[in-house]
Amino acid sequence: MASTRELCHVLHPVALKKLAQDWLQEDTPGFDHAGYVVGDKEKTAVLLCKSTGVLAGVPFFNAVFEELDCRVEWLQSEGVWLEPVITVARVMGPARRLLLGERVALNCLARCSGIATASRRVAEMAQAAGWNGEVAGTRKTTPGFRLVEKYGMLVGGVSTHRFNLSGMVMLKDNHICCTGNITQAVQDAKKVGGFPLKIEVECCSLEEAREAAQAGADIVMLDNFCPQALHTVAQALKLAFPRLVVEASGGVTEKNVSQFFGPHIDVVSLGSLTQSFSAVDYSLKIFRGSRDANNFNNNNNVSTSSTAGAMSSSSATGTSFAPGRHNFAF
C-alpha cells in the first residue's frame, strides 16, 4: 500500500493531546453547570463557515473533540477556500461534551483559518509577481498558541520562519549592542551553534550587512529599508556574496508586500500574518435529531474549489500546501 503524507503529520500527537487538554481545562476549571442542564443525550452538531477564508486548524479541532470522546466527520478538506454559508463538518457526541468543546475548538479553527487566509493571499501575490523567493511569517505569535499559528502559515503556503529561539541564531540590534560589534557576535554564535545552526544578522545598512557576511553569517536581514534602498543594497550584497541569503523585513504589510519582491531578495517576512489577520467566522449548530442535521447539510452546502465528500477526522487534512521553494530552514 502506498504511503500517504499530509500536512498534519508535522504535528506531534502528544503535543496535540496536551494542548487540547490544557485548553479544555482552562475553559472549565471547575463545575460545568450548564452540562447538568443538557445532559448526555446523543446529539449532532453542524460546523458552519459564515465568512470567506481558507479552512485550517483541522487537527486542533479534532484533538479537542477526541478528548471529549466525540466524533468528527469532515465535509471539506483543509486548505480549500470556503464561501459562506457552507457546512464544513459534523460533530457527533453527548450534548454536554459537544458544548464543552464548542468554543475551544471554534477558537482554534477561526484563528488558524484567519492566518492561513492572510498567508494564502500574500503567497498568491508573490506567485502573481513571478517572484521566486519565499514569503515567511515571524516569531510574533501568541504565547501558548504558536503551534496553531505556525500551522496556519503552512496551510496558507508560506514559510513559518524559525519556530523558536532554538531553531536558528538571529542576532538583532540588542544582541549587537550587548556584544559590541557584529563580527564578535557572529563568531560567538558559531562557537555554540556549530555547523547545524544557521546564523542571521539584522542589519540597518550596507556596511553592517557586509560585516555580517564577512564574519560568516548565513543570512542577513535588511530591516526597515524603503523598497528602493532595499533592492540597491541587496544587489550589492549578492554581487559580493552570491551564496548569502537576503531577507527583507520591517514595515512590510499585506498592502505593500509586492514592493519588497525583487531578484536579489530571497525572503520577505511580515509579522502581520499573525498580528493583523481577521479570524474566519465559524459556528457550531446543534440539531434536535440527526435527520434535521442531514436535511440542513443537503440544503446549505455550496460549491468550493474542491470536491466535498464525507471524510473522517483523520482524512480531512489533504491540504493544498505549497512548500517554500528554497528551504532556508527558518
Image (cartoon, helix red, strand yellow):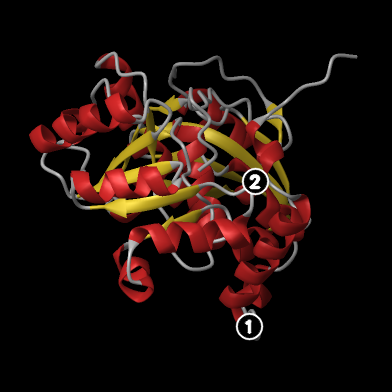
Q: Position of residue 209 (x, y in %)?
A: 28, 46
Left or right of residue 61: residue 93? right
Q: In the rendered view, would you say 216 is above or below 306?
A: below
Q: Position of residue 12 (x, y in %)?
A: 73, 50
Marks 1 and 2 close (CB-CB < 8 Å): no
Distance of mark 1 from mark 2, alpha carbons?
43 Å
Residue at 68% x, 36% y is 73
Dot 1: element = loop
Number of residues whose C-alpha sits closer than 10 Å to that of mark 2, classed few (under 14), some (14–19) or many (20 or more): few
Q: Is residue 152 visible?
A: yes
Of residues 106 and 286, the one drawn nearer to the viewer in this rendering: 106
User: What residue did someone put label 2 on?
Assistant: 196
The type of residue carrying mark 1 is Pro
The type of residue carrying mark 2 is Pro
User: What residue did someone put label 1 on?
Assistant: 29
Q: Position of residue 302 (x, y in %)?
A: 43, 21
Residue at 51% x, 63% y is 188
Q: Which quadrant: the N terminus?
A: top right
Left or right of residue 36: residue 170? left
Label 1 or label 2, whichever lies nearer to me, is: 2
Residue at 63% x, 83% y is 29
Of residues 76 and 197, the one drawn nearer to the viewer in this rendering: 197
Q: Is residue 288 visible?
A: no
Quadrant position of residue 314 = top right
Dot 2: element = loop
Of residues 63 and 47, the one drawn nearer to the viewer in this rendering: 63
* Residue furthest out toward the bottom: 30
Q: Earlier in the sequence, mark 1 or mark 2?
A: 1
Q: Position of residue 216 (x, y in %)?
A: 46, 45
